Image (cartoon, rainbow, N blue to C red):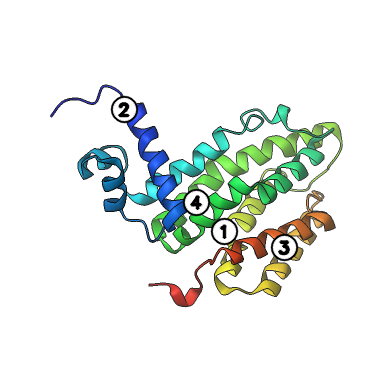
Amino acid sequence: MARNKHPEETVEKILRVSLKLFQEKGYEATTIQDIVDALGMSKGAIYHHFKSKADIMDLLSERYYQNLSWFPDPKGIPGENGLEKLRYVFRYFLSDPSKEEIDGMMLPLLRDPKMVSLSLDSVFREAAPYMDRLVQEAIADGSASPQFPQVLPEAFMLLTNLWMWTELYRRDREGFLQRLLFSKAMLEHFGLPILTSELVEVSMDYYDRLLARGIPTEQDRP
């Protein structure tokens, strides 16, 4: 078999075609064979770069963050201080249509133990350290004086990335609101008031939009 001289181009092509299929058919309805057929490649060529469809989706999510101009360096985030930057990031990710689309495709993956494990790893390896940089900036500029600053970013990221998302499966809007208000109260109690009343409203709008996409319920689980 000839060696692929341009693996990066192949990966980009797989991502581009897979995203198009996920958008048109939905993540769960799209099979690896669908991707193979659309690409005109062998199944082995895809598995050379990705172990599974979930790995394709995981990299699509990662690329979303990489493509944000301000994301690599928190210094570029709009805001006069660390606390304002934290609020900007939270608001942005709940308002950006591209992020909402990625989230809508990613959510069903949380039924997969492998993806839950990947999500946990992402929280500890990427999300929490990123938030920690902004928390440290808020401490330095005096916009926040949190208790337990070493662990608070991890706790908040776990709450928002995993714990709160389960209410989307249950379609329990009141349950989602209660978890959101608990997170708000917890952050305020520990001196990091990220969630304003306006951000609570933005979060609820996000919840409603995701549900309108037809997120599967607990009863839909295999």
Kindly report the distance in space between the C-alpha atoms of the residues bearing marks 1 and 2: 33 Å
Q: Which mark is residue 162?
A: 1
**Dot 1 and dot 3 residues touching (CB under 8 Å):** no
Identified by mark 4, the residue type is: Ser
Q: Which residue is mark 4?
A: 119
Residue 194 position, x and y percent, is: 78, 49
At x 63%, y 58%, the residue is: 159
Q: Which residue is mark 3?
A: 204
**Dot 3 and dot 4 residues touching (CB under 8 Å):** no
Q: Which residue is mark 2?
A: 7
Of mark 1 and mark 2, the one earlier in the sequence is 2
Residue 41 position, x and y percent, is: 24, 39
**Dot 1 and dot 4 residues touching (CB under 8 Å):** yes
Quadrant assignment for the N terminus: top left
Kindly report the distance in space between the C-alpha atoms of the residues bearing marks 3 and 2: 42 Å
Q: Judge the density around disc 2: few (<14), some (14-19), many (≥20) Cα neighbours within 10 Å.
A: few
Determine if residue 60 is in view: yes
Q: Judge the density around disc 1: few (<14), some (14-19), many (≥20) Cα neighbours within 10 Å.
A: some
At x 26%, y 47%, the residue is: 37
Secondary element at image label 1 = helix
Kindly report the distance in space between the C-alpha atoms of the residues bearing marks 1 and 4: 8 Å
Left or right, 140 with respect to 125, comes to right
Identified by mark 1, the residue type is: Leu
Mark nearer the viewer, 1 or 3? 3
Mark nearer the viewer, 3 or 4? 3
Left or right, 8 with respect to 104, comes to left
At x 54%, y 57%, the residue is: 104
Secondary element at image label 2 = helix
Kindly report the distance in space between the C-alpha atoms of the residues bearing marks 3 and 4: 22 Å
